[in-house]
Image (cartoon, grey):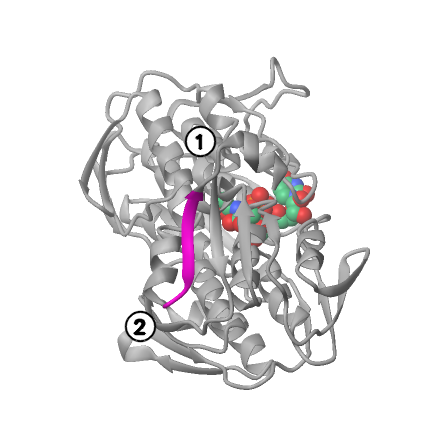
Amino acid sequence: MEKYRICGGRPLVGAVDISGAKNAVLPILAAVVLTEEVCCIENIPNIADVSTSLEILTALGATVRRLDAHTIEIDPGHLLTHVVPHDLSCHMRASYYFLGSLLGRFGVARTSMPGGCNFGVRPIDLHLKGFRALGAEVPGQLDNGMIEVKAESLVGNAVYLDQVSVGATVNIMLAAVRARGLTVIENAAKEPHIVDLANFLNSMGADVRGAGTDVIKIRGVEYLRGANYSIIPDQIEAGTYMAAAVATGGNVLVRGVIPKHLESITAKLEEMGAVIEELEDEDAVRVSCNKPLRHCTVKTMPHPGFPTDMQPQIAVLLSIAEGTSFLTENIWDNRFKYISELRRMGADVQVNGNTAVFQGVPRLSGAPVKADDLRAGAAMIIAALCASGVSTIDNICYIERGYEEIVEKLQALGADIERIYVPSSTSQAM
Ligand code: EPZ
């Protein structure tokens, strides 16, 4: 049983290099099966979800070759099946992106019904609505926990997304690039990773226009060629380190970022009293904070609003900000499970429906806590870094799904953090 052990109270100081974006690389790796030619993807983060995606590609029959620590060459020319193995797809929700890309490649795709998550039900009705609109047959119910979509031929169509959905936008794009004619996705997600996927598809010879706006137009093409592509930096990883720098009263240069992708995060941290300098020519931001944080109100919204994937992280800052702060979660119906862990560290917070109300406390105190999911786990790390005393964090596998070398990166910033091994018999006792 591995845990993180953190001794808090030390300001983070130094520089951190941001890795490629998890939520961009996962759809792009799924998109590779749309061509029969070799693709070379650079700036790939070494995280568990990428490993799972590469295992899925291999299981489908692709040849996967690592060229260096962050560059992978994939040859999808000899795929053997349209079925994503259950034992892989049940581990990672984003495996459902292979539904769209295998449907686009073969006219049929089969994968596990994605599991729920620790922050509520995660339906895929909008994905299936999009596939049906393109002419695919979608089953009314699952067979043996698997979902299969198939189409004699995919024909472009208009799809209105009742709710802004990153996953549905991605999946419809992946199927539509090989559909005959024009597909128009209305009320599309506008996240940077949607734009990154569109740019990758267009580098393969697709015709995708309007990504980053709420109307995306895709004119299907007969053939997609292989491409070389570099993944954008991870806005959420960058935001996480920015929040950690602010929480610990430190001074951190966050390098290898696109400052524009961070605007909503930067604005909120500055509102709380942080000083953030955008170094455009260096693709970096410098984040510092040397005074008590001011209370504020945060509401998560689809991009370009404040990202839901930064919600737990900013909650730590609100718990130590002077006065009363309000945090409203507008994307997920149950993304406050981690609050109970934050209370164990001394936070004074009440959750009323989709809003958490914080009464700031001077300082959190170290405690044994656990990661409920990826971003909640990152929040526990930030809380432990700014708390007095020692904390241990359990369920670190969630964290390592989405943060490359987080222990090493934090140690380089002066954090007292280490990965410890706790024999399972004692871990229950702690
Ligand atoms: C993506 O999840 C991200 N995951 C999530 O990040 C992120 O929280 C989310 O987008 C919102 O930005 C990846 O990109 C791999 P949605 P996704 O479809 O696509 C509802 C992380 O920490 N909805 O945009 O699953 C849904 O219930 C992860 O990196 C439907 O109702 O999210 C939610 O309320 C966590 N029907 C809202 O839409 C559908 O068919 C937004 O979900 C699909 C979604």
Q: Which residue is mark 1?
A: 98
Tell me where the magenta segment starts and ends, as one range: 414-420
Instruction: Give the quadrant of residue 46.
Output: top left
How many residues crowd around disc 1 within 10 Å: few (fewer than 14), some, or many (20 or more)? many
Measured as percent of width and height from the top left, residue 317 is found at 61, 70
Give, as a three-letter code, the residue at label 1: Phe
Is residue 266 found left or right of 66 in the rendered image? right
- Asked if residue 286 lies in the magenta stretch, the reply is no
- Who is closer to the viewer here, 349 or 177? 349
Depicted 83 relative to depicted 367: above or below = above
Ligand 1 within 8 angstroms of badge 1 C-beta = no
Could you tell me how far apart the alpha carbons at marks 2 and 1 are, in whole angstroms?
32 Å
Depicted 401 relative to depicted 150: above or below = below
Q: Which residue is mark 2?
A: 283
Q: Residue furthest top?
A: 144
Measured as percent of width and height from the top left, residue 130 is found at 58, 37
Q: Residue at x 53, y 31 (%)?
A: 424
